[in-house]
Image (spheres, coloured by chain):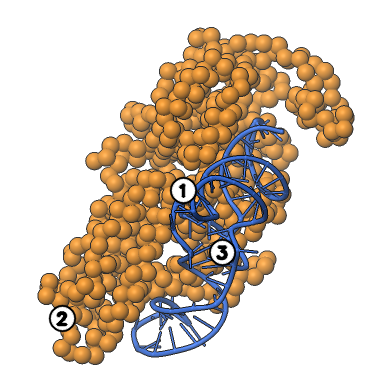
Amino acid sequence: MSGAYFLTTAIDYVNSAPHLGHAYEKVLADFFARHQQSLGSDVLFLTGVDEHGQKVQQSAQKEGIEPQLFCDEMSARFQRLHESLGVKASHFVRTTDAHHKTIVREWLQRLHDKGEIFFQEYEGYYSIRQEQFVTEKDKVDGQWPEIFGEVIQTKEPNYYFRLEPYRQRLLKHLEENPEFVVPTFRRKELLGALTEPLADLCISRPKSRLSWGIPLPFNEDYVTYVWFDALVNYYSFASIKGTLYWPPDLQIIGKDILIPAHGVYWPIMLFALDQALPKHLLVHGFWTNSGAKISKSDAKSLVDPVPYVEKFGPDVLRYFVLREMVLGQDADFSDERFDTRYTGDLGKKLGNLVQRTLSMIGRYRDGKIPSYDGFHITPADTALRSDAVVEEYRRAVDEFAPHLALQAIWNLVARANEYVEETAPFKLAKDPTQAKRLDAVLGHLAETIRRLSVLIEAALPFTAKKIRAQLQLPLGPVKLEEALFGNSLHGHVIGKPEVLFPPFEEKPQAGT
RNA sequence: GCCAGGGUAGCUCAGCGGUAGAGCAGGGGACUCAUAAGCCCUUGGUCGGGGGUUCGAUUCCCCCCUCUGGCACCA
């Protein structure tokens, strides 16, 4: 047993609909979660939604419904997306959950008791229309832009959390734990952001201005604002049946929320509360849409993952995002690239390999995987008998490089396709004196298909099960060690081949 | 402005001191088990520009150009 493994994703803000970026992060987390499960770990995997705040309050108001109802509807939408992608979290976090509210209030109270939180009057410019404070920096050509409406000077007392006292400790932590932020260049950015003294963090809003939030335990006229509510979710749900999994082994976030939220506020909150820090903050990049930046304010730029899942199935989108994006970097999404991965890697390489293997076993051996002996193994079989792929795959996943892990698997797929050409079982089948050798070749191919079904389990769980179903093997759960070469299939009867990734006659047309 | 990461074949990228690689796209071939699939061969690059270090630089150093991102609550 590898023990416990706790991982989280960022929680998504329910104010806008889920898009490809949300889908990617969840698939990524699900991939690591399934991988850890296949290693025998006891996995706690959290994902969910962030439901409080001004924008949600406003959106609900605009639709004329209660904020809670708005949240229920949007949260369901995110949950449906996760489900359609095969993202199987241990728990779907909602920040409107009563338990979460209790924990947030507990933490705030403890920090308040310790003197980490203080009350202070802030005087500044306030936009009545936007219901928010604005600064000189917001001015355009010395004037407040029209969107702010009337701007007045006003005073508002709020609660603040002190960050600066912990800056040096955070820097030290980063020095001593270079793996705290992955990839390295993000760690450097964080170090850069920590060279200047940190301003106090405003953590409250008066209820008169924002009602949709968690009330402060020491002053019920205020609610807590943004990060105190959102970040604490990782702790609120870190237990299963009384067992605490803290600290997280892996926290997956987008590059936009490393600085300052997860890279500064979060560790300092944990310092202040004497809690252990997560082992890794894994920072992923963003998707572009056919080369264009994806922006929430530009509906045209958004990529909706749902139609792709509906048309191609969850594994295709999973494979695409894991294979195409170098974790940490940005990557581009386009129908053309998607089609290339689908038709090529999945259909013609993997799908066809499974198809031709099963077909030949059906045709030449009545669907029974033949047994073979050592006398009929030849050097041609060596590549398929090697376990190097498993090691290569594992190392890539350990190094947070799913694209390389998949590349390693597809190298085996390619070798297996080459093997068919090289050993030409369809020729052996015509020569009765080669029957034993044909047994060995088909045996190796069947075993390769089986191993592939294990190797792709974390990335393409549905396809993995389809392959095992065709082999008439138990569907799972599987352990990665089952991907080692063996000969358990001798004499096993398989089912009928079924096309895994059928070709689409027509290219997807615009508007359909 | 400061900081970071890029600029390498038509496209996406790897290589990072010893006269350039992969996948996809393009061209050709042999085969037929298979999703008109797979396999083999192949066209294609003065490695952003300039200077320097070196016997030798795409690879190290400096300068410049250019793109992207961070320093500000959008995965």
Vertically, is A219 above or below B28?
above
What's under tag 2, amino acid-wise?
A: Lys
Q: Dot 2 corresponds to which residue? A: A436
> What residue sits 17% from the left and 70% below the top?
A490
Residue A91, percent from left and from top: 43, 39
Q: Nearer the viewer, mark 3 or mark 1?
A: 3
Q: Dot 1 corresponds to which residue? A: A28
Front one among A388 and A64: A388
Which label sits on residue A482?
none
What's under tag 1, amino acid-wise?
A: Leu
| Chain ID at mark 3 | A
> What residue sits 67% from the left and 67% below the top?
A510
Hue used for the chain lettered B: blue
Label 3 crowding class (10 Å Cα cut-off): few <14, some 14-19, many 20+? some
Quadrant in which residue A201 is drawn: top right
Q: Secondary structure at mark 2?
A: helix
Quadrant in which residue A218 is drawn: top right
